[in-house]
Image (cartoon, rainbow, N blue to C red):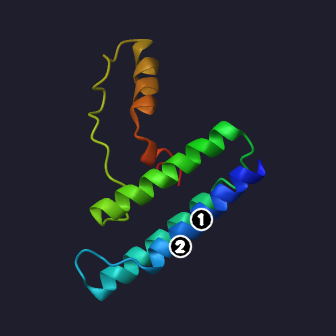
C-alpha cells in the first residue's frame, strides 16, 4: 500500500468515528441514537480489520469507494444501516443448465458498491 493510500484509509477511518461521535438518530430517541452509534463503530472496526491485510491497489480502492458510499448514504438518509438491494431472485436470466452460473455472476455484478462487503460479515 502506498503512503497516499494509507493516508486516505486512515483519514476515512477517523471520518467514520467522527460521524459516529456526532450521530443523531432520526427518531431522536436516546436508545436509538446509542444503538446506531454502536453499530457504526462496530461495523467500521469489523470491516477495517477484515480488510487490513489487503495489498492489491484495486481491492483497496474498491473498499475505499464502498466506505465513502456508505458514509454518504448514511448521512443523506440519516440511517446507518445498509440500504437493501431489491433484485428479484432469478430475475436476470432463466434457470437452465449453464445459465445458472451466469445468473450468479450477473447477481454479483449487479450488487451496489455499498453492499460489496455486507454479506461477507
Residue 105, compared with residue 9, is above or below; it is above
Q: Nearer the viewer, residue 88 or 42?
A: 42
Give the image location of residue 24, x and y in percent. Answer: 33, 79
Give the image location of residue 76, x and y in percent. Answer: 31, 60
- Quadrant in which residue 89 is drawn: top left
Residue lying at the far top of the rendered structure: 97
Give the image location of residue 116, x and y in percent. Answer: 49, 44
Residue 40, compared with residue 96, is above or below; it is below
Density class for disc 1 (Cα within 10 Å; few <14, some 14-19, many ≥20) is: some
Q: Nearer the viewer, residue 83 or 4?
A: 4
Q: Which residue, given by chain and number where applicable, does mark 1 sit on?
A: 13
Residue 102, compared with residue 2, is above or below; it is above
Residue 36, compared with residue 85, is above or below; it is below
Decide: marks 1, 2 in contact (CB < 8 A)? yes
Residue placed at 54% from the left, 65% from the top?
Answer: 44
Which mark is drawn over residue 99? none
Residue placed at 44% from the left, 18% from the top?
Answer: 102
Q: Which residue, given by chain and number where applicable, does mark 2 sit on?
A: 17
Residue placed at 46% from the left, 25% from the top?
Answer: 105
Amino acid at each position: 500500500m502506498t503512503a497516499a493510500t494509507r493516508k486516505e484509509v486512515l483519514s476515512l477511518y477517523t471520518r467514520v468515528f467522527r460521524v459516529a461521535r456526532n450521530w443523531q438518530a432520526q427518531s431522536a430517541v436516546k436508545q436509538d441514537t446509542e444503538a446506531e452509534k454502536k453499530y457504526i463503530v462496530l461495523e467500521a472496526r469489523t470491516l477495517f480489520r477484515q480488510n487490513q491485510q489487503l495489498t492489491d491497489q484495486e481491492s483497496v480502492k474498491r473498499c475505499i469507494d464502498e466506505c465513502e458510499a456508505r458514509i454518504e448514504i448514511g448521512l443523506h438518509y440519516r440511517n446507518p444501516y445498509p440500504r437493501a438491494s431489491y433484485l428479484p431472485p432469478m430475475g436476470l436470466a432463466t434457470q437452465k443448465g449453464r445459465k445458472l452460473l451466469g445468473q450468479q455472476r450477473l447477481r454479483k455484478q449487479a450488487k451496489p458498491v455499498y453492499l460489496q462487503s455486507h454479506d461477507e460479515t
